[in-house]
Amino acid sequence: MSAKAKVDEEKCVGCSACVSACPVEAISMEEGKAKVDEEKCVGCSACVSACPVEAIGMEDAE
Ligand code: SF4
Ligand code: SF4
């Protein structure tokens, strides 16, 4: 897997739905915004589907 989830902090409303959706616990809340640990993210995109405000997208990683 090469893609990683990326949170748009301008759009994130801090609902934490993505935290619950992530199967590998790669997302945590920091100061009311979701933060993806790219070391843990396996690129499954479950969080993208879970986000109610489309604040998460997939971005190609090196
Ligand atoms: S893409 Fe999958 S593994 Fe990566 S943060 Fe989102 S839910 Fe977690
Ligand atoms: S699901 Fe979307 S709005 Fe909710 S905390 Fe995650 S990124 Fe933010």
Image: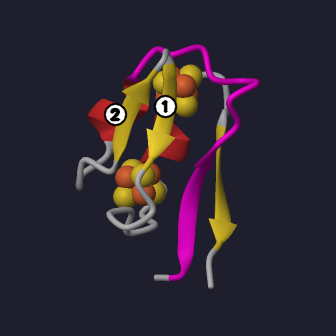
N-terminal-most mark, 2 or 1: 2
**Residue at 39% over, 25% down:** 17
Q: Determine the CA span between mark 2 and mark 1.
A: 8 Å
What SS does tag 1 mark? strand
Horizontal side of residue 53 vs 29, given as left or right: right
Q: Please give the residue where the numbered disc 2 appears in the rendered image.
A: 19
Any atom of ligand 2 within 8 Å of the CB at mark 2? yes
Kind of residue indicated by mark 1 = Ala
- Residue 42 appears in the picture as rendered: yes
Residue at coordinates 37% horizontally, 67% vertically from top-left? Answer: 39
**Amino acid type, mark 2:** Val
Q: Nearer the viewer, residue 29 or 17?
A: 29
Rendering coords of residue 27 (x, y %): 37, 42
Q: Residue at x 39, y 26 (%)?
A: 29
Dominant SS of magenta comes to loop
> Residue 50 magenta-drawn?
no
Q: Position of residue 45 (x, y in %)?
A: 48, 56
Please name the residue that numbered disc 1 is placed on: 34
The residue positioned farthest toward the left in the image shown: 24
| Magenta residues, start to end | 2-16
